[in-house]
Amino acid sequence: MAKAELCNEKISELAVICNDGISEMAELMYKNGDSYSTYEKWAGKLQDVYTKYAGQISDAYINSAT
C-alpha cells in the first residue's frame, strides 16, 4: 500500500508542475501577445512530458508489485 501511495504522490506532484507550467505559459502568452497556437504547441509538449514520466512511475510501481 505504501508503494501505491508513493506512486500517486509522485504523479500528483508532476501534475502540479505541469499545470503550473501551463498556467505560466498562458500568462506569458497574454503578456507578450503571442498566438494561441504557439501556446497550445508548447503546452502540448509539456503535457507529453508529464504523460511520459507519469507512465514511467506507474510502470515502476506495477513492476515492483508483481
Image: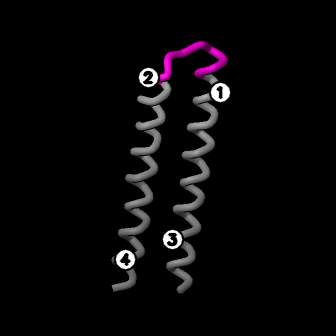
Quarter where residue 19 is shown: top right
Real-space Cα separation, disc 3 to disc 4, in angstroms: 10 Å
Which sits in the foreground, 8 or 36? 36
Q: Nearer the N terminus, badge 3 or badge 2?
A: 3
Q: Give the amino acid type for the residue marked by disc 2 in the picture.
A: Ser
Badge 1 element: helix
The amino acid beneath tag 3 is: Cys
State the separation of the CA atoms marked 3 and 2: 33 Å
Q: Residue at x 46, y 50 (%)?
A: 50
Write down the quadrant of residue 59 in the picture.
bottom left
Q: Which residue is mark 4?
A: 62
The answer to whether 13 is drawn above or below residue 3 in the figure is above
Q: Point out residue 27 in the picture as x, y percentages from the top left corner.
A: 65, 27
In the image, residue 11 above or below residue 1: above
Distance between the alpha carbons at the discs numbered 2 and 1: 14 Å
Label 1 vs 4, first from the N-terminus: 1
Task: For the residues labelled 2 and 4, say whether their Cβ atoms are less than 8 Å apart.
Answer: no
- Which of pointers 2 and 4 indicates the residue nearer the eye? 2
Label 1 – label 4 distance at C-alpha:
37 Å
Left or right? Give the position of 41 relative to 6. Answer: left
The C terminus - image quarter? bottom left
Earlier residue among tags 3 and 1: 3
Residue placed under numbered mark 2 in the picture: 37
Q: Could you tell me residue 32's position as x and y percent?
A: 62, 14
Residue tagged 3: 7
Quadrant position of residue 2: bottom right
Give the spatial CA distance, label 2 vs label 4: 37 Å
The secondary structure making up most of the magenta span is helix
Residue that label 1 marks:
27
Q: Which residues are magenta?
A: 29-38
Residue occupying the point 38% across, 61% down: 56
